[in-house]
Image: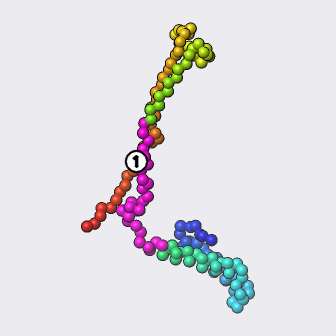
Amino acid sequence: MPIRIASLTERISANGQALHRAMMSRVETYGAEHEPSDAEQALIEERRQLKEERDKRLAHAMQPKPTAAERLVRTHHPQAKDKPRAKKETKETMSDSNADPRSAIPGPQPNRPGPTGSSSTSFSMGGKPDFETVYRRPMKK
């Protein structure tokens, strides 16, 4: 069971006080030769776990920490993806106004016989460009 407290000193102190009260209560009630109660055993076990966790944290804090340059070199820098290029799309439609009057687009001369045409061109850029900045430590000679 992990204990998630930044400082264990206060928890160890509070546990020690509760354990001392439990021991004094047992000695006054039953005598010094009587076995510890279940509550007292639980306090002893909790105190042992708190001290182990404190020792683990101390050992972890004493390990060497990476320097700022080492952290930059170890940072994951993904490779740049292929950048999307501008796409040009041209659509041309031809329709015969005599074939289907509903498909003809009304213009300034609605009864004009013959084919009508329309053309559209659109440019589209891909998504946002991918930027990459890589910091590397200079090689020592």
Quarter of the image for the C terminus: give it. Answer: bottom left
Residue 76 placement: quadrant: bottom left
Report whether residue 61 is seen.
yes
**Residue 67 in magenta stretch:** yes
Quarter of the image for the N terminus: give it. Answer: bottom right
Residue at left offset 58%, top offset 67%: 4
Amino acid at circle 1: Phe
Residue at left offset 58%, top offset 72%: 11
Q: Nearer the viewer, residue 138 or 44?
A: 138
Residue at left offset 60%, top offset 74%: 14
Give the x, y percent position of residue 26.
Answer: 70, 84
Give the x, y percent position of residue 61.
Answer: 46, 72
Tell me the magenta residue range: 60-86
**Which residue occupies the extreme bottom position in the image?**
33
Instruction: From this view, report whether residue 14 is shown above or below residue 78.
Output: below
**Which residue occupies the extreme left position in the image?**
141
Residue at left offset 68%, top offset 81%: 41
Give the x, y percent position of residue 85.
Answer: 42, 39
Instruction: From this view, report whether residue 51 is shown above or below residue 69.
Output: below
Which residue carries the number 1 mark? 131
* Kind of element beneath mark 1: loop
Residue 128 placement: quadrant: top left
- On the picture, is 91 further left or further right than 138? right
Report whether residue 31 is seen.
no
- On the picture, is 78 further left or further right than 29? left
**Residue 99 in magenta stretch:** no
Give the x, y percent position of residue 131.
Answer: 40, 47
- On the picture, is 121 further left or further right than 99? left
Residue 106 placement: quadrant: top right
Crowdedness near tag 1: few (<14), some (14–19) or many (≥20) residues, C-alpha within 10 Å: few
Q: Nearer the viewer, residue 133 or 17?
A: 133
Prevailing SS of the magenta stretch: loop
